[in-house]
Amino acid sequence: MTSTQTPQPGTVTMFSTTWCGYCRRLKTQLDAAGIGYTEVDVEQEPTAEAFVIAANGGDRTVPTVLFPDGSTATNPSLADVRARLAG
């Protein structure tokens, strides 16, 4: 699986960096909620960085979350992630 392929149903792909506090918070919340995710460090994967920039109108903002339907959200809350996965 390449870093920008859509995730399996019920899971997300989270594009992050090692130093991002918002990313750490969302990972902790996803873990506590039992929501599966694949983490991709945009500083280590150039194609992931390009995907994040394209998804955010030219900004390299993380966390950017990719959902199974191919949509994305920037810095979503846990409630947002749950709602998007349920819908």
Image (spheres, grey):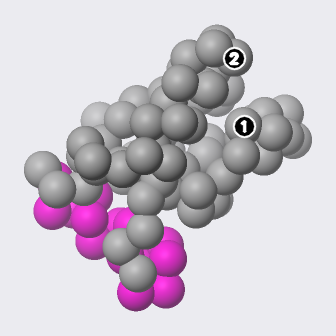
Compared with 29, 23 (above or below) is below
Q: Which residue appears at 78% of the width and 34% of the height?
A: 82
Kindly identify which residue carries mark 2.
Answer: 33
Question: The residue under label 1 is which amino acid type?
Answer: Leu
Numbered circle sitting on residue 78:
1
Q: Position of residue 76 (x, y in %)?
A: 66, 52
Q: Main secondary structure of the magenta part?
A: helix
Q: Are marks 2 and 1 in contact (CB under 8 Å)?
A: yes
Residue 24 magenta: no
- Amino acid type, callout 2: Ala
Q: Is residue 43 depicted above or below 84 in this figure?
A: below
Q: Is 36 displayed left or right of 34 in the figure? A: left
Give the quadrant of the N terminus.
top left
Q: Nearer the viewer, residue 79 or 4?
A: 79
Judged left or right of residue 27, residue 53 is left
| Residue 46 lies in the magenta stretch | yes
Other residues around mark 2 within 10 Å, as few (<14) / some (14–19) / many (≥20): few
Element marked by disc 1? helix
Q: How far from the left and from the top, in percent, is residue 7?
A: 50, 36
The stretch in magenta equals 45-58
> SS class of the residue under badge 2?
helix
Q: Give the residue at x 15% y 62%.
A: 46
The residues bearing labels 2 and 1 have C-alpha atoms spaced at a distance of: 8 Å
Residue 70, can we see it? no
Q: Nearer the viewer, residue 51 or 8?
A: 51
**Considering only vertical position in the picture, is 29 above or below 87?**
above
Can you name the residue that lies furthest to the bottom here?
58
Going from N to C along the chain, the mark reached first, 2 or 1, is 2
Q: List x then y, in percent, for residue 12.
A: 55, 36
Residue at (26, 65) in percent of width and height: 49
